[in-house]
Image (cartoon, grey):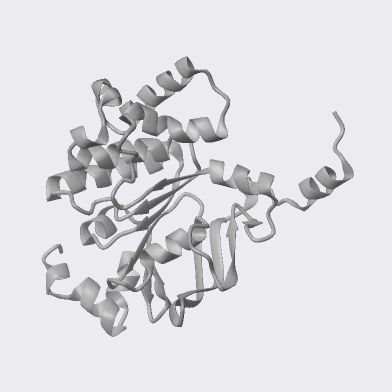
Amino acid sequence: MSLTDAEASETAAAPDPDDVENVLSVQGITVGFGKKVILEDLDLDVKRGEVLGFVGGSGTGKSVLMRTILGLTPRRAGTIKVFGRDLSSASEKQRKAIERRWGVLFQQGALFSALTVKQNIQVPMREYLDLSQRLMDELAILKLELVGLPQDAADKFPSELSGGMIKRASLARALALDPDLVFLDEPTSGLDPIGAAAFDSLIANLSSTLGLTVYMVTHDLDSLHSICDRIAVLGNKRVLAIGTLDDMMKNDDPWIKSYFRGERALRRV
């Protein structure tokens, strides 16, 4: 079947996703609400296959940036490229194809309370795929097993789950479409130290076995120490520094120094 001229042009102009080193590239992003500017001229690259931890003080805009990348919060300026494609110039078809390749875990899980866990996992499948109910049921069970939940959790409602189970069910939904890129917003918040450590291990294992690129908004120093390949620090409306944990430990910016080498941080060394 031959391509139309428009389709051929679009295909020729599209970068090969497997040749793009930066899965996510943010350049010159400015976001504000009314007269208040939250992010200004911010740049950030996320490399293929890495776990990037994104940190910053409370209210600095960590979650705002993630929501802006996802298209949930409008931006005033800047470009966002995902898999080499500029989201501003992407067609509806291209945008849908990109969204199918990412998964999102929001801070409080954001599960639909009126749906069972299985039905929550199937929401992305219904939106992007054309599958039989039987196949979606089988896939939902596979995703539950992938995140370490028992099969009997499938027919439970979110109100019947513990905090840790909600996080895992939400992660299962984020993995429903076998994404290449996963966004995690404070994935260990509200978990006890044992549960948080187990969730960190789960993320690390999934990243390694599935080849995921992980963008993780977090304030958890243990997560930064245990699973992040690089760390980006948000401050003064832009990225102050980006690098390995060793790079952060050597940085003399007052906030970075206090965060990574302060009294609470040193207890983890």
| Relative image position of residue 84 (x, y in whole percent) | 63, 55
Give whichever of 65, 113 is nearer the camera. Answer: 113
- Res 33 → quadrant: bottom left
151 lies left or right of 264 = right
| Relative image position of residue 231 (x, y in whole percent) | 36, 64
Q: Is residue 189 above or below residue 157?
A: below
| Relative image position of residue 87 (x, y in whole percent) | 62, 57
| Relative image position of residue 3 (x, y in whole percent) | 85, 37
Q: Is residue 231 visible?
A: no
Give whichever of 145, 110 is nearer the camera. Answer: 110
Q: Is residue 167 visible?
A: yes
Q: Residue at x 68, y 44 (%)?
A: 93
214 lies left or right of 82 = left
Q: Residue furthest front?
A: 114
How many numbered discs?
A: 0
Q: Is residue 163 above or below residue 220?
A: above
Q: Residue at x 37, y 73 (%)?
A: 234
Q: Residue at x 47, y 18 (%)?
A: 133
Q: Quadrant of the C terminus?
A: bottom left
Q: Is residue 222 above or below residue 154?
A: below
Q: Quadrant of the N terminus?
A: top right
